């Protein structure tokens, strides 16, 4: 019984081995036909070394087992490459040192991925070296379209650095995409400096520009000052004319009122009015040291020699005659220390 069982198991063992081998081969084939596409990567499926399709969606995918189909992974991550300091010329012929960077990645378009493989530069370092060459040429071309003040300027309205970066990226984008299948994501300037000779010329030009601006501001200030001064003089003349007009009106009103008052006073007592006016004129004319030689019967000096009219009323009692000299004997304008009546010509004239 045991011998019979052993014979059967000996017959089954080769079959099991064959089945196990077939299962193993199937599992190995299935494993080789299964591939994983990682994020930010693409897989190019080749058939006998020729690219047939490109897988860009992350996840599992199938292919024919090797050696019928193979795979080539392509890195789609974003990378940056610097140009290093490049000596370029501006529009006015000045030399400047520019260092730019470029952010790039292999484009997800299957045609561009195949183009990237055809270049043979799969290594990122090889791609970076090629991009530096393109970037240096683009810097030379782009810098010739801008002046130095467009690139280096404290006034942000005059500076055009953003336009320089945009034009640099535009000059690179299509050329690099068509040649390598690489998409330029961003381009910028890392460093911008001046050689010694350019720095001296720049300082001299900036000094001249500042002097021109200072002269313009000075001229504008002088014009503004002249305008302000002219307006002030005009306003002063206008105010002065108005004041003179008001003064003239006030004086006219005063004269009119004074004339009315004088007329009323004259109408009340003409002789008293004449006497008061004569005395006012004498007070305004004769000073402490004034000497006058004139006729005593002339106005307004007649008041010096005429007697005042007697006021009406009861007659006063007769009194003893006064020893005061008559008005005609008064001395006019005799100052302190002047000669006496015997030697005073005015006194003699008045007498």
Image: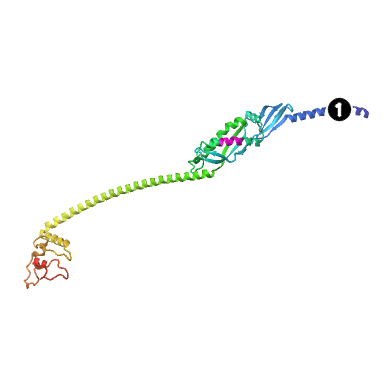
**Residue 114 picture quarter:** top right
- Decide if residue 190 is on the left or right side of residue 299: right
Q: Which of the image's four quarters has the C terminus?
A: bottom left
Residue 27, x across and y down, in percent: 77, 30
Which residue was labeled with disc 1? 14
Q: Residues within 10 Å of mark 1 (few under 14, many from 20)?
A: few
Residue 44, x across and y down, in percent: 68, 30
Residue 323 lies, with reference to residue 140, above or below; the image says below
Residue 155, x across and y down, in percent: 48, 43
Outermost front residue: 197
Residue 134 lies within the magenta run: yes
Residue 335, x across and y down, in percent: 16, 68
- Decide if residue 185 is on the left or right side of residue 315: right
Q: Residue at x 33, y 48 (%)?
A: 229
Of residues 6 and 313, the one nearer the viewer is 6
Residue 144 lies, with reference to residue 351, above or below; the image says above
Q: Residue at x 34, y 47 (%)?
A: 226
């Amino acid at each position: 019984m045991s011998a019979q069982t052993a014979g059967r198991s000996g017959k089954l063992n080769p079959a099991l081995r064959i089945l196990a081998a077939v299962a193993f081969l199937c599992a190995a084939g299935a494993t080789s036909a299964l591939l994983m596409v990682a994020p930010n990567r693409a897989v190019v499926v080749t058939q006998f070394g020729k690219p047939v399709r490109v897988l860009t969606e992350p996840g599992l995918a199938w292919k024919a087992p090797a050696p019928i189909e193979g795979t080539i992974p392509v890195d789609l991550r974003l990378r940056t490459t610097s140009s290093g300091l490049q000596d370029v010329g501006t529009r006015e012929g000045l030399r400047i040192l520019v260092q730019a960077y470029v952010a790039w990645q292999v484009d997800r378009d299957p045609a561009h991925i195949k183009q990237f493989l055809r270049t043979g530069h799969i290594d990122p370092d090889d791609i970076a070296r090629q991009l530096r060459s393109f970037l240096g040429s683009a810097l030379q071309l782009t810098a010739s379209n801008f002046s130095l003040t467009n690139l280096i300027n404290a006034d942000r309205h005059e500076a055009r650095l953003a336009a320089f970066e945009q034009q640099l990226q535009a000059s690179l984008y299509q050329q690099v995409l068509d040649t390598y299948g690489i998409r330029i994501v961003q381009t910028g300037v890392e460093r911008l400096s001046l050689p010694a000779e350019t720095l001296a010329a720049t300082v001299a030009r900036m000094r001249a520009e500042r002097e021109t601006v200072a002269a313009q501001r000075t001229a504008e200030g002088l014009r503004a000052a002249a305008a302000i001064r002219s307006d002030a003089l005009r306003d002063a003349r206008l105010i002065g004319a108005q004041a003179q007009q008001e003064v003239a009106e006030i004086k006219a009103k005063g004269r009119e009122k004074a004339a009315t008052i004088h007329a009323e006073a004259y109408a009340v007592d003409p002789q008293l009015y004449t006497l008061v006016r004569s005395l006012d004129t004498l007070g305004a004319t004769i000073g402490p040291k004034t000497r006058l030689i004139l006729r005593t019967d002339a106005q307004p000096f007649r008041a010096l020699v005429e007697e005042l009219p007697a006021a009406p009323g009861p007659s006063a009692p007769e009194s003893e005659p006064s020893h005061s000299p008559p008005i005609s004997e008064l001395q006019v304008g005799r100052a302190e220390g002047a000669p006496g009546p015997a030697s005073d010509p005015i006194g003699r004239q008045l007498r």
